Amino acid sequence: MSYQSKNSITPEPFWRESTKLASFSSLDHDIHVDVAIVGGGITGISTAYLLAKNGVKVALIEANQLANGTTGHTTAKITAQHDLIYNEYIQHFGEEKAKLYYDSHTEAKNFMTQLINEHNINCDYSAQDAFLYTTNNRGIGKIEKEFEAYQKLGIDGQYLKDLPLKLRTKAALSMKDQAQFHPLEYVSFLIKEIIAHEGIIFEDTVAMDIEKENNPTVLTKNNRKISAKHVVITSHFPFYDSRLYFSRMYADRSYVIAGYSNQPFPKGMYLSIDQSPRSLRSASYNDRQLIIIGGEKHKTGQGMDTMYHYEALEDFAMETFESFDVQYRWSAQDLTTLDKMPYIGPLENNNPSILFATGFKKWGMTTSTVAAHLIKDYVLGETNTYSELYSPSRFVSDPSIKQFISTNSDVAKHLIGGKLEQPTKNVDELESDEGSVVTWHGKRAGAYKDTDGHIHVVDTTCTHLGCEVNWNHGDRTWDCPCHGSRFGYDGHVIEGPAKKPLKTLHSEKN
Ligand code: FES
């Protein structure tokens, strides 16, 4: 089947189409609260929920719409099986810390399950075992090592040779009693509870900076101020980054399709550990079983035509199931820290008035709850068993130094390489709905011709630190290969660390 027919599907996650979240106005006056939370994804919302329940006056602001970033683009597995990680953590951090990591996510899963059961949250929750699998011989040893790590840490799992899906499995590893759900239905409940506990929420409110006097004050793009005892940054890349955390993380993108098949999906959530990973789970929608397939990761702004990734997922779906009719497609961006352990805690050493949480890899569902509890405890001055494990100022171990050098040499390569690249295309060669790097008045620029034939030309120099952005046709965005900033076709900021739009060179507005 050609993917051309599916090219017209708008890149919109199933979660958003099937849920209506409450909407909120933007902040138009100065306010004072106990805690200002910047970033309205599941982490910011869970943190606001816990704090508001504890009698803390919170204000949550979101630059766009609530839960429209990573949270709205997830595959929504509530699990402590985070790919192959436990053997690696034992090597890098030791058994005790690897166990703490597992415990923190198991507690988070139990907290979410209990909340859902206690309040009858209608969020398509179901208990499922999680499975890792490999389809090639090289992966067998890795699965075996991970199984050994499970045994050392007391994780309830099983080594398997086969799975109830046509996946050409060579080896697999289960983790028992995990779960899946509809993340926006869950978040919708938390939002109502925040409001019921006198929390306040603003959308379309962009935080630009933090002024530090006695108390930190968040300054917004439209010149409003939120003064607070604590500022909590849950904006994916921290919008305020006095310690340059952006240079200690990398961003990658992955892709998801969802559709219907004649073949029933068995119980379980699956993830391959192979070079082109595949993630599978089901969801129910309108009494039908929807199959969700993710995978195909690459570093943001690097790699081939992004439509290729959707096509590869659809080919995989057709091979695995007897039929597959794609209904939705979307992509996600995830951040990974150099040592693969999230950063949760004070942004600056010994200053708990500015807290942040980021670098969740692809595992935001449980990590958001781990972060919300940790941040709540920092704010309330309570001790938390996991604070040292996730501390952003933790000792930087040897593997992360190597990774730091390689990540930043990659940035240097793109910083210089992008500028030297000579575009061969001109604007008048663009087809409808095509974007490309072009030559514009003798210089490198980015042009997109929309479906009405209007041309939009932007300066391709990223407003963060000056790398050259590349066209992402799958999402119609300009993506930066250095630290993952993303911009709309007209240059507006979709994702940081950049805060300013790409410079407009020419725009034919509708
Ligand atoms: Fe850092 Fe573009 S995101 S230079």
Image (cartoon, helix red, strand yellow):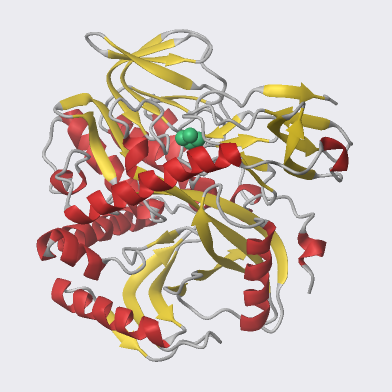
- Counting from the top left corner in percent of width and height, residue 384 is at 14, 43
Question: Above or below — where is 166 with respect to 304?
Answer: below
x 53%, y 43%: residue: 417
From the viewer's perspective, is 56 left or right of 271? left
Question: Above or below — where is 184 with respect to 199?
Answer: below
Q: Nearer the viewer, residue 272 or 364?
A: 272
From the viewer's perspective, is 138 left or right of 437? left
Specify the quadrant of the image occupied by residue 93: bottom left
- Counting from the top left corner in percent of width and height, residue 501 is at 59, 25
From the viewer's perspective, is 106 left or right of 510? left
- Counting from the top left corner in percent of width and height, residue 48 is at 36, 33
x 81%, y 38%: residue: 426
Quarter that holds the C terminus: top right
x 71%, y 66%: residue: 326
From the viewer's perspective, is 111 left or right of 429? left
Quarter that holds the N terminus: bottom right
Question: Above or below — where is 337 with respect to 497?
Answer: below
Q: Nearer the viewer, residue 350 or 192?
A: 350
Is residue 235 in sight in this rendering? Answer: yes
Residue lying farthest to the bottom in this orientation: 161
Is residue 288 in sight in this rendering? Answer: no
Specify the quadrant of the image occupied by residue 58: top left
x 42%, y 55%: residue: 362
- Counting from the top left corner in percent of width and height, residue 340 is at 30, 54
